[in-house]
Amino acid sequence: MKNWIVYFGLVLIAGFGVSFLIRLIRDGDFYIAEFTVTIIGIIILLTGIFAKKNIKTNDTLLK
């Protein structure tokens, strides 16, 4: 149901997180924008996963 939220979080982590880690390890540069978007992606991913679990538990309790 809310799979697009999980996928959006994964896209943010994959796109910005990987480039952040590569630049940090290779050049030693810390880009705050990429770090911030990666953290936002992690928060969105966790929110989507926990919301998905809550919806499943609420649906089984109502039936």
Image: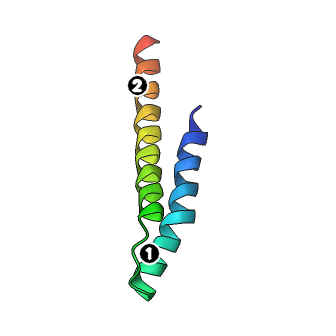
Residue found 44% across the figure and 75% down from its top: 21
Q: Residues within 10 Å of mark 1 (few under 14, many from 20)?
A: some
Residue with the most extreme bottom position: 26
Q: Are marks 1 and 2 in contact (CB under 8 Å)?
A: no
Q: Position of residue 29 (x, y in %)?
A: 41, 80
Q: Residues within 10 Å of mark 2 (few under 14, many from 20)?
A: few
Residue that numbered label 1 is attached to? 21
Residue 29 marker: none
Residue found 58% across the figure and 48% down from its top: 8
Three-letter code for the amino acid on which mark 2 is drawn: Thr
* Element type where label 2 sits in the image: helix
For marks 1 and 2, the one nearer the N-term is 1
Q: Position of residue 16 (x, y in %)?
A: 53, 64
Residue 1 occupies which quadrant of the picture? top right
Residue found 47% across the figure and 71% down from its top: 20
Residue with the most extreme top position: 62
* Residue 43 position (above or below residue 13): above
Q: CA distance from mark 1 to mark 2?
A: 36 Å
Residue that numbered label 2 is attached to? 57
**Which one is closest to the eye, mark 1 or mark 2?**
1
Q: Position of residue 44 (x, y in %)?
A: 46, 44
* Element type where label 1 sits in the image: helix
* Residue 21 position (above or below residue 39): below
Three-letter code for the amino acid on which mark 1 is drawn: Leu
The answer to which of 13 and 1 lies nearer the viewer is: 13
